[in-house]
Image (cartoon, rainbow, N blue to C red):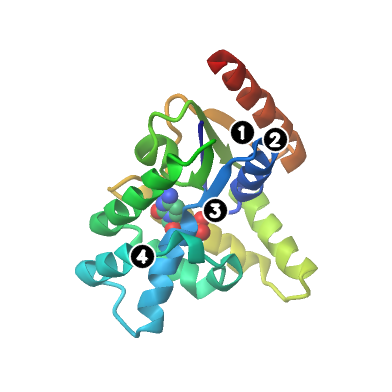
Amino acid sequence: MIIAIDGPAAAGKGTLARRIAETYGYHHLDTGLTYRATAKALLDAGLPLDNEAIAEAMARKVDLAGLDRTVLSRHEIGEAASKIAVMPSVRSALREMQQEFARREPGAVLDGRDIGTVVCPEAPVKFYVTASAEVRAKRRYDEIIEAGGSADYDAIFEDVKRRDERDMGRTDSPLKPAEDAYLLDTSEMSIEAAFQKAKSIVDAALSRNA
Ligand code: DC
């Protein structure tokens, strides 16, 4: 079983993906971390972010077992990741790894931007999780405040919009819903309600295949 979850930054797809994976005992891969790990390796080595051959070589060295969300969640790593994510050879190197992961038994949940459209177009269950830019910026703001940090809502809002433009506007594998994806708009739906809805769709797919 492969479950593909796509959507813009901070829409709640990571939380949803983790809960689905836990519920069904499937493997989970946040594919954004593979782009982030590539970017971090370049930053750490003091290498340029605009050289596709160098970035591809770094992408090929990414170890899926060593992806550390805490380290990779840093803002500047996300910025750098969105720059190298426009490079076709970086995308194809990471895509091969992601496709291999998707074949793990008994099933895999992958979340990202192009899972249902490009990485696993054959996935029997696809979700496109979205929410308005205002709601997503507010969620990110609340997370930082709850963690005891300080944040500027307007700056976060601008950042969310800029990230959307970059993700949706690139030529190679832009962010968009697959034609057969279920749309989950979490603007006015709690993540819990989205999870319940997603679960009923996965259950229905599993009973069709049984
Ligand atoms: O979801 P995130 O913020 O961790 O993603 C980091 C960057 O990687 C983001 O700019 C989009 C890009 N990305 C991508 O292009 N394709 C994916 N499947 C996942 C992430």
SS state under label 3: loop
Mark 1–mark 4 Cα distance, whole angstroms, equals 27 Å
Amino acid type indicated by mark 1? Leu
Q: Nearer the viewer, residue 62 or 154?
A: 62
What residue did someone put label 3 on? 9
Q: Position of residue 67 (x, y in %)?
A: 51, 65
Residue at screen point 42% across, 64% down: 63
- Image position, residue 41 (x, y; %): 39, 75
Instruction: Count residues near mark 1 (Cα–Cα under 10 Å), then give few for <14, some for 14-19, many for 20+.
Output: many
Residue designated by label 2: 194
Name which quarter of the figure residue 51 lies in: bottom left
Which kind of residue does numbered mark 4 sit on? Lys
Residue 126 point in image, percent of width and height: 51, 31
125 in relation to 89, above or below: above
Which residue is nearer to you in this view: 126 or 145? 126
Mark 4, Cα crowd under 10 Å, few <14 / some 14-19 / many 20+, is: some
Front in this rendered view, residue 35 or 105? 105
Q: Secondary structure at mark 4?
A: helix
The image shows residue 115 at horizontal and vertical percentages of 43, 41
Point out the tag, 3 or 1, that comes first from the N-terminus.
3
> Reading the chain from its start, which is encountered first: label 2 or label 1?
1
Instruction: Indicate left or right for 203 with 108 as reference.
Output: right
Relative to 128, 197 lies left or right: right
| Residue at left offset 33%, top offset 45% | 173
Q: How far apart are labels 3 and 1 at the CA level? A: 14 Å
Residue denoted by label 4? 83
Q: Are marks 2 and 1 in contact (CB under 8 Å)?
A: yes
Whole-angstrom CA distance, mark 2 to mark 1, is 7 Å
Q: Is residue 162 visible?
A: no
